[in-house]
Structures are given as structure tokens and as C-alpha cells.
Image (spheres, grey):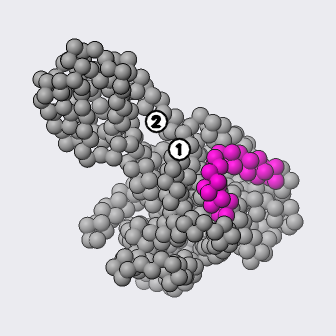
Amino acid sequence: MQQLLTTKLRESLSSVIPITVIVLILHFTIAPMPLYIMVLFLIGSLLLILGMSLFTLGADISMMIMGEKIGAHLTKSRKLPLIIIVTFIIGVFITIAEPDLKVLARQTPAVPDMVLIVAVAIGVGIFLVVSFLRILLQIKLSYILIFLYLIVFLLASFTDKDFLAVAFDSGGVTTGPITVPFIMALGVGLSMVRGDNTAEEDSFGLVSLCSVGPIMTVLILGMFYNSSQNSYSPVTVPDFQNFTEVILSFVTNTPHYVEEVSFALLPIILFFLLFQITTLRLQKKPLAKIIIGIIYTFLGLILFLIGVNVGFMPAGYYLGEKIAGSSYVWLLIPLGMVMGYFIVAAEPAVHVLKQQVEDITEGSISGKAMGLSLSIGVAISVGLALLRVITGISIFYLLIPGYLIALTLTFFVPSLFTSIAFDSGGVASGPMAATFLMPFAMGACEAVGGNMVTDAFGIVAMVAMTPLITIQILGIVYQIKARRVTEDAVSHPLMEDSIIDLNDDIIYEMTFVEYNVDNNIEPDVTTIVTPIEKEMEMNLNHTIGQEYNDDAETCTLSNDRLEYKQEDHNGTPSI
């Protein structure tokens, strides 16, 4: 456990340090912050690192296991009414408990907070049921997404423009750091019981469908409520006089976030206890491990939320306002892109997604490739969002082409990448986007005199959209390179003195034909799918009967055929 915690701490350091360094550079160059705001930010960074380490460790050993076991049990029950009722209740209650939903309710113009919270929760519950039924009935995710987003944009055309940005923001906001791991694990448990060819890709997609529910709900509410005035909760930059006040700001806010996290975790814990008592009946050792994981998750999320809300939010708002109000306003877009590139790595649910992708695909899609694609996508989205802040263009002009491209790509990309891509949109738009990037855009909007509701809001929606494109482009690259290597292997059969060069950390699906002693091609073909994680060469120039050994593979050239034995890998493509 200690070694795992050390690994998580190292990952958290590598995720948080880049954005911390960027803020420090801005502080010492073009946007100097008041001393105590800077101290607030640095303490927040430390809490972020500790919180993310504990949260990701806790999610791995508790949230994911609970979700998988509940999902697997529901599938094994083969009782459709039970599956529908339970998944709907789970979706409603974990959404009501989501802390970010309360923030969204305060930002939505005209609609009473409780009305919006209950409506959005019902929407998530309905779409969680749809997600489970899709997996059970094995309906292709892309068809459902195309249909749903056609309805979304049809509703948007009849909704007050003041609701548009908030509505699309809601899709990312409600899939927070607690909701995402549990919902994803439910999908894994449900699909893996089937064990068929599409189980892997069906493990993903729940988050993407649950993100559509809040968007539709807010758009429908916008038809019934008249937003006569724009309302939002402005970010206040505290004016501290001494270091004691800085420390007190963290201390006084702690009970609030303890209450929020307790309320958010309670429904999941209660559902798990119900299943444990009635059906699961886990032994003491695995149950104790889950309890320890829940404690880690609880403490980690408290530290994380205190860090981002108390430490990061004022710094983000101040930097945005300072830069936009200076002669360096042209730097807003490139600076926002750089911050977006690095800040997505600090989203706790992103770490959970990358780990689950590696586990489900058995290493065929690496976390490194996922992280790079997400970072590029978020960088583009923040740049476009800040372009909106400066120019005031409608969010429609960016969302419609963006989703059109994303949905078109679903016809050309492996289904697994489509499922992962649409899940990643909800995952990337987490608390870091809501508490740093959003205040940064709001500060900039305030400085340039824009409309806060229509121009600043929408940055979370952009962050949720662009990964849909970049992850699917990753899938196209994956597909092309895998096909190219396969074709090369078929067109250039192995001869004496040949060397196979396997590199570039990409999937290699290779086909070796069999030979007899006269070098005549046998009719049988042996397909080898090799995961390659570092550059290596395999020299097949060996005498008959000699065995070639490597850490990854063992090859034997016998009298009648080339035999291949894979020792330490799982046999799936690796990217």
C-alpha cells in the first residue's frame, strides 16, 4: 500500500507542478499577484498534490471495486425491472450529492436551485438506465449519440440564449470526481459479465450518455423560465492583511467541504452496504480494503476541493482580470492554451479514466497516449473559449461544427475509441476546469466588459467537446499504423538474416507465414499481436532448432516452422 501511495504521490506531483510553475512565471513577469493571494495559491497547490494522491489511491481500491461488483451483480440477476429501478435510483442520488451541481444551480439564471438540481438528477438517472440497456442490448454507442445530439441542438434552437452556455457546461459539471469513477466501474462490471467480443468497448460510454441528460434538462427548463436578468455568483478576491488570515481561510472553509464530500459519498456507500448485506457478502479482508479506500477517497477529495476552491479560484480570477486589462490582452489565448494543456493532468478523474483504459484494454491503449490527446484537446478548447471572451461570438458557432466533426468521426474510428472519447469529455471537465479555468475566463470577461453569462460561461462545455475529437483522431492513427505494419508483414515474409525493427510505442499486429525446410510457404498463417513498449530488435538469423530469447518474446526456428511463444505480455495491441 505504501509503495502504491508513493506512486500516486509521484503522479500527482508531475500533474500539479507544471500549472504551478506557469502561475509563478506569470506572477513574476506580466501579472504580479498580491503576496497573500500567491501564498494562498501555493498552499492550494500543496493540498492539491496530497488530495489527488489519496483520492486516486482510494478510488482504485474502493470506488472502482464497489461499482464493478454492483454492476456485475445487476447483470447476473437477469431481472430487467431490477436493473432499471436500481440504476435510475443510483443515477438520481449520486447526482443530487454531486458538489459541482450546486455550483451550477447558483449560476443558472432564473431557475430555482432545487428545481434545477432535481431535474438534472432525474435526467442523469434516465440516461444511466439508457446506458445500461444499451450495454445489455448491445446497441452501438455512436448511433445513440448522434440521435441524442440532434435532439440537443434542436432544443437549443428554441431556448433562450442566456441558457445555452450554462446548459452545455452542465454536461461536464455534473460528471464530477465522485460520479465518474463509480459510473465507469458500473459499466465495467455490467459488460464484463457478458464476456463477448464487444464487452471491452461497452465498458465505456456511460459517462458520455449521462452527460447528455443535464444538457437536455437545462435547455428544456430554459423554455419555461424567463431569464430577465443574468445571475451568477461572482468570484471575490480576498484582501488579506497577514498570514494568519490566509491560514484561517482554509480552516474556516474545511467544515463546508467535509459536509459536501460526506453528502456526496453517502449514497454510494449506502448502495454498496445494501448489496453487501443482501447479495455480495464479501469476506472481511476485501471488505476492510474497501473501507480503507473509502477513507482515502474521503480525505483526498476534501483536501483537493479545499485546495482548488480556496487556493486556485482567486488566483485564476485575478490572473484573468489582470492580463485582459493590460496591454498583454493578446496573450490571453496562447496562455490559456498552455494552462489548459497542463491543467487537465491535475483532474483527479482523468487519472481514474487513464488507469481504467489501460486495465480494460490490457495495455493496448496507454495512459501516456490518452493523456497527450486529452491535453491537446483541452488546450484547443481553452483557446477557443478565450477567443469567445475577447470577441463575444456565440458558443453555437463553435459547438455545432465541433460536435459535427466528433459525430462524423464515429463512422471512421474503432468503436472502442468512440466510447472512450465521449467518456473523456465528461472526465476532462472536472473541478480544475470549474475552479481555475472558469474564474480565469470570468476575470478576463470582466476586464474586457463582456457578458459574463453568454461569453465567460461555456468554457467547461468547450473542454468537454474537444477531447471527443482528439481521442478519436488518436484512434485513426492507431488504426492506420496497425494496418500498415500488418500489410508490411504480409508483403515481406520472413527470410534468413531478416531483422524486425519494432519501435515507436505503437501497436504492431504482425502476420508470420510458416515455412518448411525447403523454404516453401505452408498454407497456414500464424498471426502474432505484439505489444511493444520500447525500441527493440529481434534477429531471426538462427540455426535450425536454436532458440532466441528476449524479455518479451521467445522464438524457435524448428525443422518445419517458425514457432513463437509469448511469455510476459497479454497479446493485445499497444499504443
Q: Decide: marks 1, 2 in contact (CB < 8 A)?
A: yes
Residue found at x 82% / y 53%: 155
Residue 471 locus on image (x, y percent): 52, 43
In the rendered image of this protein, does residue 503 appear above or below residue 335? above
Highlighted magenta segment, given as a residue range: 128-156
- Badge number at residue 11: none
Q: Give the quadrant of the N terminus.
A: bottom left
**Three-letter amino acid code at the position of disc 1:** Phe
Report the front residue among 199 and 537: 199
From the viewer's perspective, tell me whether residue 97 is left or right of residue 230. Answer: left
Q: Give the quadrant of the C terminus.
A: top left
From the viewer's perspective, tell me whether residue 373 is left or right of residue 232. Answer: left
* Chief SS of the magenta region: helix
Report the front residue among 533 and 108: 533
How many residues crowd around disc 1 within 10 Å: few (fewer than 14), some, or many (20 or more)?
many
- Badge number at residue 478: 2
Give the CA separation, mark 1 to mark 2: 10 Å
Which residue is label 1 attached to? 417
Residue 396 locus on image (x, y percent): 74, 46
Tell me the SS state at disc 1. Answer: helix
Report the front residue among 533 and 415: 415
Residue found at x 67% / y 64%: 129
